[in-house]
Each structure stands twice: as structure tokens, then as C-alpha cells.
Amino acid sequence: MSFAASRAVLRHSQFAVRRAAIRNASTTSEVAGSAKEKASQAASKASEGLSRVTSSAGSAIIKAGQFTSSALGGIGGRTGRLIGFVQSMIPPTIYYSRVGLELGKIIFEQRKMSPPSLATFQTYFQPVLNALKHPGNLFTQATTTSSTLQPTQILNRVRNLSNAQLASAAVITAEVIGFFSVGEMIAQMDVFKLLSRSAKHSQAAPKQTLPSSGEAPNPQLFGRSEALEAQSNVQSTRKRKRGQDDSKQSVELPPALDFFGDSSRHKKGKENVKDRNLASGRSKESREDASKLEAKAVSEDTSTDAASVSYSEEECKRVLRTHKLKITVLEDYKVLDQDMAVEKKSKKRRREEQQLQKSASKKTKIQLYPQPLTSFGQLRTRYSISKRLVENIESQGYTVPTEVQLGGLPLLLGPYDAHIRDYRNGENKGPAKQAEVQLGQQIDLLTIAPTGSGKTLVFLIPVLNACIHDMKSTRQDDAHSNGVHASKVGPRAIIIAPTKELAAQIVNEGRKLSQGTGVKISLMKRGMEVVERLDEEASGDGQLSHEGDSEDDSDSADSTTLERSIRSAPRKKGRAELVKAAILVTTPLALLNVLKMPSGQIAPLPTVRYLILDEADVLLDPLFRTQTLSIWNTCISPLLRISLWSATMGSNIEQLALSTVNERRRAPLIRLVVGLKDTAIPNVAHKLIYAATEQGKLLALRQLLHPTSTLSTDTTPTLRPPFLIFTQTIPRAVALHAELLYDIPPEAGGSSRIAVLHADLPSTARDSVMARFRRGEVWVLITTDLLARGVDFRGLNGVVNYDVPNSAAAYVHRVGRTGRAGRQGGVAVTLYTTEDVPYIKNVANVIRASERLRGTEGAGAEGAVKDWLLDALPTPSKRDRQRLKKRGVEARRPAKEADGKQRAKTRISTKSGWERRVEHNRKGAE
Ligand SMILES: Nc1ncnc2c1ncn2[C@@H]1O[C@H](COP(=O)(O)OP(=O)(O)OP(=O)(O)O)[C@@H](O)[C@H]1O
């Protein structure tokens, strides 16, 4: 009796659990992979088999049990009791195995519990089915024939239940409730996710992630396609310890680079760190222990790294080429004594010599093959970087160095052994000329690397490390001298960026890396004092700037003398406190404003040893050129090292940098190029859309905002928020913002989801919009080229060029706001009208080059620029390009500068703001 009832209730509960499972299905996003499928098949087969056994054999077993029971009923004593016990255990055994099986099915078949077969269903529910078919019978039965269905009879039967029967009913009820609870718990726990952790993700149900957001499994852009090719080389090339015989060791690339090899050792190290973190995170009070453990893990990790290994020239070359790195010494450089001799020569003579050098440098190309940095652990073991700094790098989640980090950090952190090959007139003359070059910290560097490739880290790490060392040695000096901290006399490093937003971002990154090191990094703000000035100087004498020049020109003498004279100088009352930061990040104008003395001269910066120009091509462009060069010249320390960084660099800017460096003639200028120069990153999908008119552009943008309204057969990914919209001018950004304000439905946040950011906004408003966009509160941000460079929004899914960019470089930078650190899936849409046709070929060429890198080139299904389009577009002349760069598309210039006809074209909308508001309010009222 109890067994039959259990089964019936169990069948009911199957439906209930299944419903619960469906309800909770949304909580389980991950599905099991092939391993789980196999397990599921096995489980369902076993289940089917056992189901059959239990359902068909169940009744037989019971009958047999009853028969055996009556047959054996007469047996008494111990044997009889044993038989009785076994007999009583049969139904619960069948019942519990059934429960276990159903649970197994829930787990392994992802809650797809099979409903009972029709036959089984009929067995249990036939009376109910009959009653439903013929409800009249039920009534007749109840009132006339069947006495058992009469309420009084049912009540009597319940009253007459024995204690044992009541107990067994209670047990069954409890079991059923328990079974429900287990089902619910499984649904809530997301057991499948736990079980499928080690399994591959199912191909059938790909995980939906927003493009360009989330984790970047590998921040590198290049090298993966060549990995297979390199694999064959791995067999033949070898990793070599210094002084070791080449022929004895087979090559084993470090795990970070070894995309195709066994990286279990490295992974294990990382997992150790993670596990320890997890363990340590369990108790709050053990946080301190956790950091100690982590530090230990990092040091363990670095100690097991291939950090002490040096690679042969061939291996260095292979790694650098695989990652598309090219390092060139831009000219032959001279030692300091010769420099000084040059300086004494007349200006004319010097110019002639420079001309000669320029033509000679064209013919001479010296290629460098430094030891690549294949893991961040090598920073410590190979370059003795501050331990805390390395820990901070790792705690930011950086594990694999990007290409620019792989090549740039060794150049800046040396000294190291570089393999140099001398190519004269492009010919390889004989065997490689190997030389031990003590570079590192002794070079000036010009780096051209793709957007989002992590250049910030490359210039911050060496500078931070130098400041940490400086600080340590100054502390030791102070202990013996007058106790004045070096950073109090002026900054050690200055980083210049073209916009306040980028400068603030660099400070933010720097602060994360410098945590716990004691090095201060500050953003230049109005009212700050950067250098201590003497009273006479403040009154306009400008003595100090000449003092530096008149000093003996030996390397360290003048800067230290200057520092000493500044320290002892009387400080004028009422002046702002000196900036205490060792690293100062600024825009050119902000710094110059502070440095300008009443006489109009610029105060010198004798303490600055590192000058970093981020987005150097724009800083040396006519707009900022004078300001940037003034700051460069005011850094008078002979120890000054300069580095220039950008994703794009015209040859004229490169030449300007070279000649400015040459004037100082202290160190060789080395150029590091990653990938193809001036090309957009390959992991962004481009769309070039002809919209004919301004109205057409607005329509097209609205279709992008509401992609469901389009019946597109386009295979490229659709644009999804958050994204940036670029316009040519501030008034157009403001107008477009007003136009789109009501385009996002109120249910989705309405006008609060869309914002505008431009240079005319007050500083606090700019900061607030940036913060809201970074937090994800703003989905669509309309802006000008203010945000085109350097700014890093990790989860940005797309970029819309509402107005075409004014140069190919501007396109590269704008679209580079998405797809950062190797993330895939960003979309870049460019809308163009008939006015843009004369200039659009520049953009089309960049798209074509980027697609070539990506492998979706040409008239094929996915290429954004078809061959016929490229052929049809006119090539803009040099003059046109220059005019475009300077003024943008004429038709879109502010209305006051344009004539009456153009005026209509400059407007984004044909309706006034007032009309739009009325329309919106009316819609709201409906
Ligand atoms: N090794 C790394 N691993 C993972 N992410 C990294 C790594 N290095 C840098 N990043 C991340 O990559 C992103 C882009 O870095 P960064 O802003 O320095 O790029 P960039 O080369 O300066 O770009 P742009 O040319 O646009 O200024 C940042 O979010 C940074 O945190």
C-alpha cells in the first residue's frame, strides 16, 4: 500500500519539480559540454533501463513478495524474522532507488525529467480519467452503488487507520516534501554550472557576451596566427642559458608566449595564487596574511619563471617578428664627448651636419633584437624592479604582456644584451654584428603601437621604478644630510597628454601601480606650484634659467647644483605649496601657465629626468607644437630621457622628434613599431554607410539606435550600447544631443541614458559625465575629438563617426576606443554624405588595411569597403588633406562662418528644440 502510494505521489512530484526547474531555468546560463552529455546519456540509459525494471518488475516483485510472504509466513524464529525484514525492505529499496534515479536525471539531464509513459499514467490515473470522461458516473457512484466513496465511509476509514498505517503515510508525506525541497535546491544551486566547470562550453548554445566588454583572455593582437608556424620552429630552436651549449637543450617558450604548448606549470602557479586568495578571503582578519601569501606566491611564480633565461639572436628575432615588433635605431649616435664638440660648432655648421646625418640615417638602419619580456615576473628577476611594483602589476590582473610591453619594457629597463644587426643601404652585410649594448634608461624612445595595446603601462613602469629607487637613495642621503626629500624640490618625471581626461586617466593608472611604494603621482591643477622660484626670479629676472646654462656641462653637476641652490633659496611668503609629487601628469597649457614667470620667460625644470609625451603626434602637431617644445626645452637636465608614444606617427612628426632629440645629442633615439603603422586595430568590425544628406545620417543613426526596426541581412555585428558618437564640432555635438534626447524610451532610462561631452563644459561637468559613462549609467555619449585619443573605456561596444574624422589618424584613434586590450567585437560605423566623398578614401584605405590584418578583406561578404567603392572614390590631394585636417568638412563648420546656403547643411535637425519638446510632451500625454 505504502509503496503504491509512494509511486503515485512521486509521479505527481515529478511534474511539480519540473515546473520548478523550468521556472529556475533562467538562473542556469551555462550548459554542460561533451563530458556532461556523455554522462547524461549514460544516466538516461541507466535510468530508462531501471525504470523499466522498476515499473514492470515492481508489481511482479511485490506479488512475488506477497506470495513468498504467505509461503514463508509459517517460518518462525530467527529465519522468519530475517525473511520478514528482507520482505519489508523491498518496497522502500525500490522506492529510494527510484528517487535516486530521478535526482540523477535532474542533475545530468538538466532537469529534463521525462514524463511518465501513457501506460504508467493510465495505471495510476485511470479512475480519474474515467471520471473526467463520464462525470455523471461519479455522481451516481457516490450516491448509490459505491459505498466506499461516500464521505462517511471515507471518514470512518481514516479514523480506523492503524498507527503503523498513519506512520507510513507521514513518512511518505515527509519524503515527498523532502524530494520537492531537493529539486528546488538543485534548481537554485545551479548544479549544472558547477558540474560543467571543467567541461567545454557547448557549441550549440554559445555564451552571449557584449562585444568588446568582459575579460580579455589574451590582450595580444598579433602572434596567434603565426603560432602554428612558430610551433614547427619550436622543435628546431632552443632556449639557451648563458654559456650553455646550444645543442643540448630543446626550446621551451615561456608559458605566456607559448599559446600552443603546455602551460600547465604556469597555470598552476596562477591557480595557487587564486586558491590562496580564495582561502584567505574567507576570513576578514586574515586579510593581512592573504597579502603576504600573495606576495609569496608572486615571488614563487617569478622564481620558477623563465626569467633568468636569455634567448639566442634567432629566438629573439622569432618572438619579436611573431608579435610584429620592429625596433630600429633611428641614426648612429655619438658618445657624449663628441656631442659636446658638436655643440661648440657654429649653428650653420651644425645644420649642415644634421642634413648630412639625415641623409645618412636614411641609408643606415640598425635593427635591435632585445630580449623579449615574456612574463611580468621577469621584471623582477631580470631587471630588479621593485617587488611592490610587480605585485601591483599582478594585482591589476595583468598576466600576459602585450606586444608593446614585450618589446618596450626591455628597451626602457635595460641594461641588457641586445642583438644588433647592421643593415647598410637595406643590405644585410655578412653575419650579424653582435654587440653588448648598455642601453636601458640611456635611450630616447619613439613608440608607435596600436590603440588599446597597453602603452601606458610601458611608460609608467620604468618611471615609477626609477622614482622608487630615487626615493630610497634620497632617504639614505637625507639620513646623513639636511633631511630635505628630493621630491620636494620638483618632479622627477613629467607626463604630457593632450586632454585633461587622458591626463586624469594616466594619474589613475599610475596610482594603482604605485600603491604602497611611497611614490606620489599628481594631476596638474590650477594654483599648483611646480618649481621653487627665487624672489628675484619671481619678479622677472629669470636668473635661474641662465644659471643652468652657465654651469659646467658635466652630466650630473648642473642639475644637482641647481637643486641645491633651490633648496637653500628663501621662499616667498603667500605662495602656493610646492607640488610634492614625483610624477606630474599634465596638459601642455596647464603646465606652461604655472611655469610662466612675470617676465614672460618659462621657469626651468631642472629636476625632471623623464619627459613622456603621450599622443606625441598630436602634441607635436601645430596646435600644441610650440607649447610642447617649450616644455621640452625647459627640462634642462642633461640626464633627461624623452619618450614619445602614439598609435599613429606621420613621418614629419618623426623627423621633428628626431631633430629635437639631436639638438640635445645625449642618447640614441630608438623607434619601436608594433604591427602596421597608422592602422586601425584588426579586432574591430567596420561599417562605412553612405547616407547622402544630413537628414539621411540622422535616419541612419536612429536605425542604429533601434536595430530591430531594420530588416538587415548584414552579417557584421550590430551596434550595442554603450557607444560613443563623434561629431566634427561642439555645436554639432550639442545639437545632436538635443535631437536624440527623447529617442531612448523612458522604460529604459530615457534622456538620462544619453549625454554630451565637449571642451566648453565646465571641468566638474566633464568629470561627472565621464564618471556616469564609466559606471554604465550613460549608454550613448556624444562627443568631439576630445575623447578620440587615449581614453580607455573597457566595456565600450562601438563607435559612430556621425561626422567623418578629419584624417586617417583621427579615424584610427576614434575607432580605437573599442576593442581594447585584445577584446573582440567592437563595431565602428562611419556615416558619410556627398560633402564627404572627396575625403572619405582616407578612411576607406584604413578600413581596408585593418580588414587585411583581420582577414576579411575585399569584396567578400564581410568586407566593409568593396573594391568597386575603393576604385570609384577620388584620392584627395595633399592640400585637401591638410585643409580637412585643419578645418574639417567646410559644410559643417559653425554657422556664423558659413554662408546662407551652407547654414542649412550645418544643422542636424530641421526642427527646433522647442518643436521637439512639444512633440515629446504630446507623445507623453497620449
Ligand atoms: N598586459 C595586459 N593585459 C591585460 N590588459 C592590459 C595589459 N596592459 C594593459 N592592459 C589594459 O589595456 C587597456 C588599454 O591600455 P592603454 O590605455 O595603456 O592603451 P594605449 O596603448 O595607451 O591606447 P591608446 O593608444 O588608445 O592610448 C587598459 O584597460 C589596460 O588596463
Image (cartoon, rainbow, N blue to C red):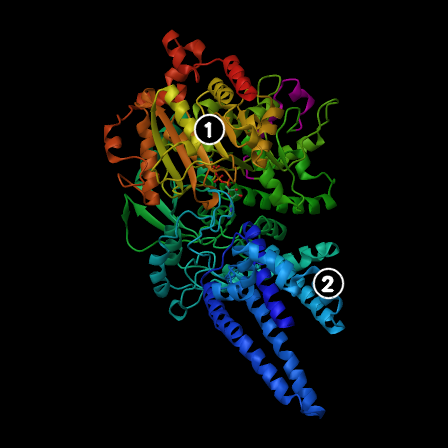
Q: Quadrant of the N terminus?
A: bottom right
Report which residue position mark 1 lands on. 725
- 800, above or below 673, in the image: above
User: In the rendered structure, which amino acid carries the disc numbered 1?
Assistant: Ile
| Residue 153, disc | none
Is residue 653 or residue 740 the one in the foreground? 740
Image coordinates of residue 264 in percent, x first then y, are: 50, 64
Is residue 118 or residue 275 the one in the foreground? 118
Image coordinates of residue 521 in percent, x first then y, are: 63, 37
CB atoms of marks 1 and 2 within 8 Å? no
Q: Which residues are magenta?
A: 532-555
The image quarter containing residue 179 is bottom right
Q: Residues within 10 Å of mark 2 (few under 14, many from 20)?
A: few
Distance between mark 1 and mark 2 Cα atoms: 76 Å
Which residue appears at 50% of the width and 74% of the height? Answer: 56
Q: Is residue 548 magenta?
A: yes
Q: Is residue 136 left or right of residue 617?
A: right
Q: Secondary structure at mark 2?
A: helix
- 848, above or below 92, in the image: above
Which residue appears at 48% of the width and 67% of the height? Answer: 44
Image coordinates of residue 650 in percent, x first then y, are: 38, 32
Which residue appears at 49% of the width and 52% of the height? Answer: 400
Q: State yes or no: Cβ of the residue under disc 2 lies below 8 Å from any atom of ligand 1.
A: no
Q: State yes or no: Cβ of the residue under disc 1 lies below 8 Å from any atom of ligand 1.
A: no
Report which residue position mark 2 lands on. 155
Image coordinates of residue 167 in percent, x first then y, are: 73, 70
Compare marks 1 and 2 and give the one earlier in the sequence: 2
Q: Residues within 10 Å of mark 1 (few under 14, many from 20)?
A: many
Is residue 653 or residue 298 the one in the foreground? 298
Q: Secondary structure at mark 1?
A: strand
